[in-house]
Each structure stands twice: as structure tokens, then as C-alpha cells.
Amino acid sequence: MPRRVPAWERSEPCDDPPVTTPFTPTLRRDGFTLTHYFVLVVWGWFLYSFSPSVPLLAEDLGVSKAVGGLHGTAMAAGAITAALVLPHLIRFLGRQRLLVASLVTVAIGVTCFVLAPSIALTLPSIAVVALGGNIALSIAQLNLSQRHGLAAPAAISEANGAGSGIGLLGPLAVGLAVGIGWGWRAAVVVAVVLALTVAFAVSRLPRDVPGPGTQARDVADPVPEGPLVTSSVSVASRRLAPGTSGLLVALVAAMTLENATTYWSTSLVLERTGADASIATATTAGLLGGMTVVRFLGTTLTRRFGADRVLAASFVLAIAGWAVLWTAHTPGVAVAGLVVAGLGYGAQYPLTIALLLGIAREGADRAQAVATFVAGATVGIAPFLLGAAADAVGTHTAFVAIPVMAVLGAVGVLLGVRNARAHGLL
């Protein structure tokens, strides 16, 4: 007689006996969900106010741009450290306490960063910010995945949209603060106020993650002992779910595309269009704009077509955007290419994370830690490699790597999803 599958092992929220009618996921934007959206707002503000401030920081401290670029390496180190300690900290503190602590860590790190008088102090400060920020992002995405079940791809996509949306204001705030004589630090330090405010809001949330009941777990206290934990969580922690490898390849591709383009598209526009530095820098807003739009369309797109199909299509759209950007000879066409590329890029990270957490089931904590490690390592390596290639062969030629990575990402999605479906995980 076939084994009766308990509800917590199924991919969709249902009661025994299994529901045979079609299930349409509904995204509920309640207070719990919106509070977690604001976790990504904190990170988005810091990231996109910090990045344009790096040249100004290098000038203030009297160091070269190459030395200033080490802050990106420090961020990658913080992200990798976060991945290594995340499962252990969740086990000992619980998600809610850890989320509050990580946001406070961001506030402390940003405060130290803006007050630091030398590069010897700004670099470790940024590593601390990245440590807290990546832990906060990971827990927010884990909680949204648990809260929303089949609607998790839409929720995680919208959360990332909130982060990239606020990112559009970050560079403007830096420019305004510099223009009125307050200096770039006045814009970056806003992240401290945001982080502490969201930390307080998180501390007021209920102990349990409200959700459809598929993976109910107390997020305020350490993971309790019990049959479910010992039989399922421990096994999942030793072996990642089928399909994970393909989706991790897609994650590497997604992070490479986004970060390499963010870092070096300005150089490409300068090289190919003859625009001045201010216009070339402003074209990056087209990329962020496209990313934000598609992330807020996540609910509609994933409900209608499915997260896996939208993710695969996003890599194809990224190639289309690259083709427009790569052949552009005017700033206007370059912006159009970046907008199209952003419409592809914006779906890639959140949907890859959502699918990874969805197939991981009770091993979601470990899957998120592995994803954080892979993403952090990619952020630290990919822009450097593309920059080195640009130094050797020119930015235009080096950008051929973008469609190659997009094809690799699409293949990773297709193979990963096929493997997960073969094992009944999707």
C-alpha cells in the first residue's frame, strides 16, 4: 500500500486528502510581509548610496580608485562570512532575534564607516555592514518563502523591487547632499535610521511566521528538537535538493550579469557613444528602472506563466538588452538597452532564490546559506574579471561575456527545474 504523504512534505499547502482542483497562489501583503519588504529597502538604500560614494571616499582619504575598489572585496568577504555563520546563528538565536541583531549590525557598521578617518577602518566597517546586511536579506527571504508558499516567488520579487526602487533615490540623495555642502556621508547615514527603525518593527512581529502551514516554525526561538527536525531538517542539511546545482549556476549567471553591468556599463557608454562622464553615469538608472519595474510585476508574471518560465525567459531578455547596449552609438540607445537588460536582470535573483528555497523544503536554511555564499563570491570575483578583460581587450569586446553568461544561466534554469520536477519537488 503506498505511503500516505503528510501535508508538510508537499510542495503546495493542502490538507489531507490531497486537493485535486487547480491552486492559484494569492499574495497577501499584510504587515508581516511589508515589514520584511522594508528589510530590503534598508539594503537597497545603503547599496545604491554607497556605490556612487566610493570615488568621493577615495578622494577624501587620498587613495587611488583601485584601493577604493577594495570596498567591493570587503563586501564580498562580509557576504561569504554571513553564509558560513547563518545556519549556526539561526539554530542558536532563531530567525527573529537574528534578524533584529543583523539590522542593528548594519546600523553599527554604517556608523563606523561614515566616521572612519582612514581606509584601514572603512574596509572592515564595510565588511561588518555586508555581514549584517546579507544575514538580514537571507532571513527576510526565508520568512517570505515560508509565509507565502506558492506565492513566494511573487513576494520575494516584490521585496527585491522595493530594494532596487529605493536604490533609484540613493544616487540622487548623494548628489543632493554633496550639492548643498553636507557631503556624501549625509546620504549614506540615512541607512542607520532605516535599519534601526526596521529592527524595531521586526521585534514587534509575532513569534511564528504566519503562513499556509506547509513549514510552520517558530522564528523567535532556536529550532526545537523533535521528530520533524531530526528526520527531515538534519537530512536536508547534509544534502541539497535535486535541481539545486542547476539553479546555483543560474544564480552565478544572474549575479555576474547584474554586477558586471552595474560596474562597467558606464565605461562602455563612454567608449562607444562619446558621452561625458555625468551622462554616462546617469545611464545606469535605466538598468535600475527596468529591474524595479519587472520585480513589481512579479506577482502577475509568476501567477500567469510560472516562476521557472519567467526566470528562463529573463535570461533571453537580458541578451536582447545586451545586443541593444553593445551596438549603441548614442546615449539614448544605450539607455534603452540598459532598460531592456534591467527587465531581464530584475527577475533573475529573486526568482532563482525563490525556486531554490521552494525545492529545499525543510532544508531552506541551508539552501539560503549556500546561495548567499555563491552570490557573495560572485560579487567579489565577476566585476574584477570583467574589468581585467576590459583592460586587456577593451570594454566593448569584454562585454561579449554578458550573453555567454546569460546562455549559461538559462541552461542552468532548464536543467535545475527538470531535475527538481523529476523528483516531485516542483
Image (cartoon, grey):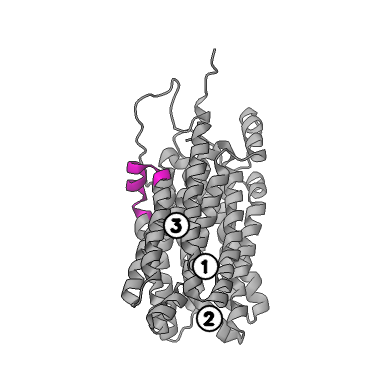
Q: Which mark is residue 55?
A: 2
Q: Which mark is residue 192?
A: 1
Q: Which residues are magenta?
A: 295-309
Q: Say which quadrant the N terminus sits in.
A: top right
Q: Secondary structure at mark 3?
A: helix
**Badges 3 and 1: C-beta atoms under 8 Å apart?**
no
Residue 34 showing in the rendered view? no
Residue 197, relative to residue 418: is it above or below? Answer: below
Query: Which numbered disc, 3 or 1, marks the residue that appears first in the sequence?
Result: 3
Q: Secondary structure at mark 1?
A: helix
**Residue 369 horizontal/vertical position (percent):** 61, 50
- Residue found at x 67% / y 48%: 88
Within-10-Å neighbours for mark 2: few <14, some 14–19, many 20+: some
**Residue 382 horizontal/vertical position (percent):** 57, 64
Residue 270 showing in the rendered view? yes
**Badges 2 and 1: C-beta atoms under 8 Å apart?**
no
